[in-house]
Image: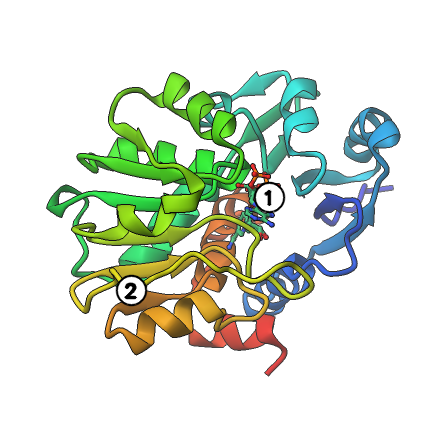
């Protein structure tokens, strides 16, 4: 009897996972391109991650996205790690190779840059300093990408100062740290202003740093995308800045994984956004 080809499976592992928009995104692409495959949300507790990663390749999975709280642990469990994932210290995309090895990558930084390129094409890295609020995992990915692009100076402020200092230790003197109580001051003269904190996200505290130094020549972007128009972006828009919401980063960070798992480079366009927003 001839063996039928296996239908490729991929998915996203998190804990919790019900809020994830990734299944809607990959599901839309699979349908759009007529690909036989499935993308499944999986709620995996931290204690079960290792076992899950051992079993999934054996039951037809070609890879997975990993999200909170598994990004660091997934990197540690991988056999092969890209340079950028190692630099960031976290993985968001795993490929289960045919030789049984797990390949880990981090596409958050390239997703961030692709979103800027798409929605603020006139912004150039060399034009001036960038101001970043927050020094968590997402900030690491954004900083790695901005340094690679050649941003001359990165001004960084985080509520917990030592996390910002850890980033400067890893990424070097191009990073200037400002105390959180004075965070608004670092914005003046920047060409790019980024919120990488979870402030402003539905269910989290409000973003309260004064933004009166924002001017119309700046590009302002928020990694938070629930809600899509955060109070941070609304204030920046009211001050005349060009704003870029965080949904595009989510869409673009997903493209390398989809391409590797399903052999088709997906497009990020208005229809993709609408599908993920459930419009
Ligand atoms: P994380 O590692 O937990 O970092 C959270 C950051 O928010 C830290 O800088 C933290 O400061 C700060 N923060 C939290 N509560 C705060 C408060 N009350 N006051 C001041 N600062 C506060 O999380 P992450 O992975 O970096 O993610 C950060 C945000 O980016 C999340 O909203 C996430 O959904 C979003 N994100 C979006 C994308 C996308 O594709 N658009 C990708 C990745 C992440 P401390 O260090 O002082 O705690």
- Say which of marks 1 and 2 sits in front: 2
Distance from Cα at disc 1 to Cα at disc 2: 45 Å
Residue at the extreme left:
127
Residue 143: percent from left, percent from top: 37, 35
Q: Residue furthest bottom?
A: 279
How crowded pointer 1 is (Cα within 10 Å; few <14, some 14-19, many 20+) is rated as some
Asked if 248 appears above or below 139 in the picture, the reply is below
Residue placed under numbered mark 2 in the picture: 212
Q: Nearer the viewer, residue 137 or 24?
A: 137
Query: Residue at coordinates 30% horizontally, 38% vertically from top-left?
Result: 155
Left-right relation of 174 to 126: right
Judge from the rendering whether residue 6 lies leftward or rightward of residue 174; answer left or right.
right
Q: For this view, does 133 lie left or right of residue 68?
A: left
The answer to which quarter of the image holds residue 267 is bottom left
The secondary structure type at the circle numbered 2 is: loop
* Above or below, 232 relative to 64: below
Q: Position of residue 185 (x, y in %)?
A: 28, 49
Query: In this view of the protein, can residue 101 be seen by the observer?
Result: no
Quarter of the image holding residue 110? top left
Would you name the residue on which mark 1 appears? Answer: 261
Q: Nearer the viewer, residue 277 or 190?
A: 190
Is the residue 234 above or below the residue 86 in the image? below
- Residue found 48% across the figure and 70% down from its top: 231
């Amino acid at each position: 009897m001839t063996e039928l080809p296996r239908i490729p499976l991929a998915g996203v592992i998190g804990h919790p996972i019900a809020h994830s928009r990734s299944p809607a995104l990959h599901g839309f692409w699979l349908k759009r391109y007529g690909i036989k495959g499935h993308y499944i949300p999986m709620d995996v507790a931290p204690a079960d991650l290792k076992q899950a990663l051992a079993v999934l390749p054996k039951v037809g999975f070609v890879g997975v996205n990993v999200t909170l709280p598994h990004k660091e642990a997934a990197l540690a469990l991988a056999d092969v790690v890209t340079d950028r994932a190692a630099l960031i210290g976290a993985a968001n995309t795993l490929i289960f190779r045919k030789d049984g090895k797990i390949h880990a990558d981090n596409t958050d930084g390239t997703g961030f840059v692709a979103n800027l390129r798409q929605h603020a094409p006139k912004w150039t890295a060399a034009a001036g300093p960038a101001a970043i609020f927050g020094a968590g995992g997402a900030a690491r990915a954004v900083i790695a990408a901005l340094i690679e692009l050649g941003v001359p100076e990165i001004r960084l402020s985080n509520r917990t100062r030592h996390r910002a200092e850890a980033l400067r230790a890893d990424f070097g003197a191009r990073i200037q740290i400002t105390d959180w109580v004075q965070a608004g001051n670092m914005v003046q003269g920047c060409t790019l202003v980024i919120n990488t904190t979870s402030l402003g996200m539905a269910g989290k505290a409000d973003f309260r740093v004064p933004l009166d130094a924002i001017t119309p020549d700046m590009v302002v972007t928020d990694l938070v995308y629930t809600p899509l128009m955060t109070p941070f972006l609304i204030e920046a828009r009211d001050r005349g800045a060009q704003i870029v919401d965080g949904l595009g980063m989510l869409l673009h960070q997903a493209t390398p994984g989809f391409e590797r798992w399903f052999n088709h480079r997906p497009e990020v366009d208005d229809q993709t956004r609408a599908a993920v927003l459930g419009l």
